[in-house]
Amino acid sequence: MVDGRVGVVLESIIARSPGEPEFHQAVIEVVGTLGPVLAQHPEYLEQRIIERICEPERQVLFRVVWQDDRGGVQVNRGMRVQFNSALGPYKGGLRFHPSVNLGIIKFLGFEQTFKNALTGLGLGGGKGGSDFDPKGRSDAEVMRFCQAFMTELFRHIGPHTDVPAGDIGVGGREIGFLFGQYKRLANAYDSGVLTGKGVGWGGSLGRTEATGFGAVFFLSHLLASRKRTLDGITATVSGSGNVATYAVAKLEELGARVVAVSDSSGTVHDPKGIDLALLRQVKEVERARISEYAERRTGSTFLRGARPWSIPCDVALPCATQNELDEQDAKTLIANGCLAVVEGANMPSTAGAIALLQQARVAFGPAKAANAGGVATSGLEMQQNASRERWTFEQTVGRLAGIMQDIHQTCEATADEYGAPGDLLLGANIAGFRQVADAMLAHGVV
Ligand code: GLU
């Protein structure tokens, strides 16, 4: 609950960032859970830590001009929000999607700050991207866009300054083009300037799988604390990109049956369980729509325009994008007896949905804890780059599993400590906040 003083602070933060509803949502969610910690530590309010933590340290906005395959001139907007460097260099992905605007990148950078704190790897928070839409673009067009984007971005980043990675619309192909242009401009092989690199040139084994695997590791701890396992349970997953694909892979490996995946055009319902090889062929190799999957897989159906949440499940993993699970969806999940919702995407559940799930005692794994495996493994990639080592897949995924266990444990212990047992949202927010806030206090008024 937000008390009077904190309410005034919140209002002023919102008023100075008009027209950024996703950023407001993220700030209200975090600050709304800080009541008990602010009561114990008046110095956070005295030193204006809330206002400072909600204000990005730096925001860079820039024009990106490039030529399409027909010689036409295209204009996009690029941005990088360097949110907080109290714990380490700014760290966070780049999103290329037509919906990208400053409010969305700010909410992502804000979330990233606390998520990165929870990894315990000494990472600050940042996020960037562009309204460029890679869909339907040729490899050559994507390359020219990435080169134009990096031509401005390169002066703001560095292995000890700011380390971007992928997010929606930015995968291995884009990171390759971005790294090539950075290397050309900087005249330096700074491996640690980007993560999510190819394994042959500085990338880490296991980074591609990490966000999806990590979310499922988190889910298995969540279930274990309720004396359940993944074996034999039914799961629905939204999305069909990198996070969703490897969540499906790990869920199936651990004995769950995944009956739905989706993309922005609709949902595939596959009661026999998702055929991972076919999913990867359709989405990764062919970059086609998810309806292609339903056409080739007998027994499955395509629900045009629908999200997966009406399909009965024991656990639901929203792994697509922000605000993709609303109050109505939460009611349906509850009515269908869903045990747990674990967020693979960033802020996929609306505030109303979270409130309903928590009231109904559905176990809830908040994004900044549950999807931290991706950025944690980026941290491991940075470690490998710094030491010029290359770890095996088993070493990296073993470290990831340990980090996810620690994050779950930290969230649980913090929720207990602040009188809200089982509230992992509160636990994640307070644990992440305290780390960043204490470092900021130690650094003085900067
Ligand atoms: N985009 C991912 C996230 O939301 C990964 C960021 C990174 O690896 O830096 O956490």
Image: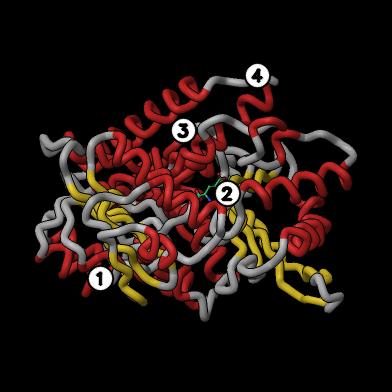
Q: Give how far across and how far down residue 240 sits, in percent.
A: 43, 56
Question: Mark 4: is the Cβ under 8 angstroms from ligand 1?
Answer: no
Disc 1 from disc 4: Cα separation: 46 Å
In terms of secondary structure, where does tag 1 sit?
helix
Q: Earlier in the sequence, mark 2 or mark 4?
A: 2
- Residue at 80%, 45% in the rendered image: 180
Question: In the rendered structure, which amino acid carries the disc numbered 4?
Answer: Glu
Q: Give how far across and how far down residue 428 sits, in percent.
A: 33, 46
Q: Quadrant of residue 147?
A: bottom right
Q: Which mark is residue 352?
A: 1
Question: Mark 2: is the Cβ under 8 angstroms from ligand 1?
Answer: yes
Instruction: Point out the frontmost of discs 1 and 3.
Output: 1
Instruction: Please name the residue that numbered disc 3 is placed on.
Output: 120
Q: Give how far across and how far down residue 444 sits, in percent.
A: 58, 43
Q: Earlier in the sequence, mark 1 or mark 4?
A: 1
- Residue at 52%, 79% in the rendered image: 18
Q: Earlier in the sequence, mark 2 or mark 3?
A: 2
- Residue at 44%, 49% in the rendered image: 243
Instruction: Please name the residue that numbered disc 2 is placed on.
Output: 92
Nearest to the observer: residue 103 or residue 405: 405
- Residue at 48%, 20% in the rendered image: 395
Q: Earlier in the sequence, mark 3 or mark 4?
A: 3
Q: Quadrant of residue 354?
A: bottom left
In terms of secondary structure, where does tag 2 sit?
strand
Question: Mark 3: is the Cβ under 8 angstroms from ligand 1?
Answer: no
Disc 2 from disc 4: Cα separation: 22 Å
User: Is residue 151 at all visible to an observer of this figure?
Assistant: yes
Nearest to the observer: residue 311 or residue 219: 311
Is residue 208 placed above or below 134 in the rendered structure? Answer: above
Question: In the rendered structure, which amino acid carries the disc numbered 1?
Answer: Gly
Q: Residues within 10 Å of mark 4 (few under 14, many from 20)?
A: few
In terms of secondary structure, where does tag 4 sit?
loop
